[in-house]
Image (tube, grey):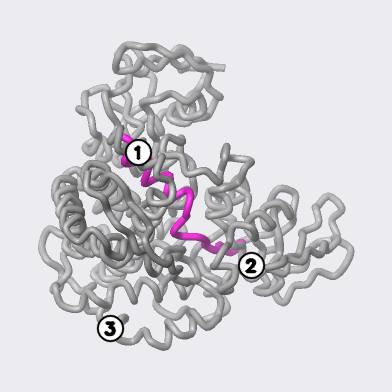
């Protein structure tokens, strides 16, 4: 099972196992990671599962879709070049070790 | 209400008035038939015991009263919501099957549509109601909530339905839509009509449709481009005609969707939240000590009360739901409220807990048809609960609580309360 490390805004790190095919958002909710809200349950509506992808992983998590790009304009914390919605990051074995930083707030 | 339970084995003729017969397939589980009318007044008065009967009878049940299959457990409700190819919306999301009956109004281009048609219209409304748009609305909605609570504190005692749950959304949503000032009194009756019309042909539905002509005429006129103020949601929808995303004929119907579902739902959501905070003062105290809980306190009220109780889908093929066979062309009733209190999914489901991890509740639906206005609802709910928590120390129920009856919506007719200022 691929592992994902979520680094909270206060630098606390939590590493969890993900199911192949789940989204990073779903993985976070499954493990009770505070800092991912996921109000719309993965419907790409709410922009409350914002993450900053660690630079070393940016090339591997795929690109930002057009709808995601618009949603990212509405995130509560600052949008940065490595901002993604974690509901749009699908976990595969290739992402084993992925590091995602959590913004200060989601709403 | 007493529910009588009879089990139809796969080898006895199923009690079906239309559609395909249940198969003589030994691998299929029998579907339990229940004598339950979930659109009857005594059911509406207290649906929870019957919701439990529906959940515990099996993963799929059959309601002989209306000849429909039904799912009431979280897993099955979630599964049906998330398989729109098998459980379609284009044959209507009420009891009426548009393949057999003429719809009472032209079908919605988003609610009563399937991909790929739905995908295009949904994208337009997603953009009109996006997180970025909510950021722009936030300060104004918050100021209006503060002003409303200040006004109510001067009165101290009032009806929290008419004077708060209805008055606050009415003070922000029609302006955000860009509606004209005249005729807004039609909005709530029109929404009540729409949600009654999803139900069976009972008295509630028939009365609503009989009285609908003036409300329908108002809404039809308000959906026209010329009647919608610049900058509002309505004008933003019409602007998508200019970009080629939708046609000029489609725009008014998409505006109609927001007028149908954008107001009464938030009225009942905010009403549910105030009713919860009045009944659970310890939760109100927690909210007052941590204002950051306001948004989740609203979300939990939506799970707990489920202002939208039910929707239907129609099967596009023979399908097994958790081992139960359902034929093609069958209506499947989803009990969102029962799913939101399914003990298989929720710890202490009967408990209103403002710190609960609410993600995944189906009070706004789930999947491609999940409430397109959910961000507007949450914004209104959050800023109102935040205003209450800052300005009010206690909400006391000081009179008879009266329920309002609707085939789809759950909410109150009257909630007399007294506020004590902080």
Q: Are marks 2 and 1 on the same chain?
A: yes
Q: Callout 2: few (<14), some (14-19), or many (20+) C-alpha neighbours within 10 Å?
A: many
Residue B240 shows in the view: no
Instruction: Name the residue located 43 percent from the left edge and 51 percent from the top edge.
Output: B279
Tell me how many marks there are: 3
Of residue A43 and residue B308, the one placed in the foreground of this image is: B308
- x and y, in percent, of residue A72 in the image: 26, 35
Judged by depth in the image, the label closer to the viewer, 1 or 3, is: 1
Identify residue for label 3.
B217
Query: Residue B156 vs residue B118: left or right?
Result: left
Which mark is on residue B230?
Answer: none
Disc 2/disc 1 C-alpha distance (Å) = 50 Å
SS for tag 1?
helix
Foreground pick, B134 / B128:
B134
**Residue indicated by mark 2:** B329
In the foreground, B177 or A84: B177
- Expressed as whole percent of the image width and height from the top left, the position of residue A75 reads 25, 34
Q: Which residue is mark 1?
A: B285
Q: Is residue B76 above or below residue B110?
A: above
Which region is colored magenta? B292-315
């Amino acid at each position: 099972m691929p592992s994902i490390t979520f680094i909270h805004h206060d630098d606390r790190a939590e590493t969890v196992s993900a199911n192949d095919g789940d989204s990073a958002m779903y993985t976070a909710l499954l493990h009770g990671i505070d800092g991912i809200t996921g109000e719309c349950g993965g419907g790409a509506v709410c922009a409350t599962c914002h993450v900053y992808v660690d630079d070393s992983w940016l090339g591997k998590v795929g690109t930002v879709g057009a709808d995601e790009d618009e949603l990212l304009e509405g995130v509560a914390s600052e949008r940065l070049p490595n901002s993604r919605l974690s509901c749009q990051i699908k976990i595969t074995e290739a992402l084993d070790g992925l590091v995602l930083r959590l913004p200060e707030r989601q709403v | 209400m007493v529910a009588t339970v009879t089990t139809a084995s796969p080898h006895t003729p199923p009690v079906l008035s239309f559609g395909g017969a249940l198969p003589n397939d030994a691998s299929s589980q029998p579907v339990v038939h229940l004598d339950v009318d979930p659109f009857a007044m005594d059911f509406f008065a207290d649906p929870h015991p019957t919701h439990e009967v529906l959940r515990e009878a099996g993963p799929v049940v059959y309601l002989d009263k209306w000849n429909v299959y039904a799912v009431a457990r979280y897993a099955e409700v979630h599964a049906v919501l998330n398989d729109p190819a098998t459980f379609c919306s284009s044959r209507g999301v009420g009891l009426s099957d548009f393949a057999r009956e003429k719809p009472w109004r032209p079908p919605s281009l988003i609610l009563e549509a399937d991909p790929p048609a739905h995908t295009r219209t949904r994208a337009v409304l997603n953009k009109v109601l996006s997180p970025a748009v909510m950021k722009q609305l936030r300060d104004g909605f918050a100021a209006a909530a503060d002003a409303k609570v200040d006004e109510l504190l001067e009165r101290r005692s009032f009806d929290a339905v008419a004077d708060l749950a209805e008055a606050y959304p009415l003070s922000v949503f029609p302006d955000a839509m860009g509606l004209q000032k005249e005729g807004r009194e039609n909005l709530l009756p029109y929404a009540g009509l729409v949600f009654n019309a999803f139900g069976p042909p009972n008295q509630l539905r028939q009365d609503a449709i009989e009285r609908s002509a003036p409300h329908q005429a108002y809404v039809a006129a308000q959906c026209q481009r010329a009647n919608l103020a610049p900058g509002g949601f309505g004008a933003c929808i019409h602007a998508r005609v200019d970009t080629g995303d939708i046609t000029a004929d489609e725009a008014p119907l998409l505006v109609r969707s927001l007028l149908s579902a954008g107001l009464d739902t938030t009225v009942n959501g905010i009403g549910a939240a105030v009713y919860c905070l009045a009944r659970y003062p310890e939760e109100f105290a927690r909210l007052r000590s941590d204002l950051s809980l306001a948004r989740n306190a609203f979300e939990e009220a939506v799970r707990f009360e489920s202002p939208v109780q039910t929707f239907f889908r129609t099967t596009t093929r023979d399908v097994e739901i958790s081992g139960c066979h359902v034929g093609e062309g069958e209506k499947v009733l989803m009990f969102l409220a029962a799913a939101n209190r399914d003990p298989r999914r929720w710890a202490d489901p009967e408990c209103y807990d403002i710190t609960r991890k609410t993600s995944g509740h189906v009070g706004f639906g789930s999947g491609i048809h999940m409430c397109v206005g959910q961000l507007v609802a949450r914004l209104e709910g959050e800023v109102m609960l935040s205003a209450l928590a800052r300005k009010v120390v206690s909400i006391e129920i000081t009179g008879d609580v009266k329920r309002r009856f609707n085939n789809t919506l759950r909410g109150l007719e009257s909630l007399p309360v007294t506020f004590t200022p902080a």
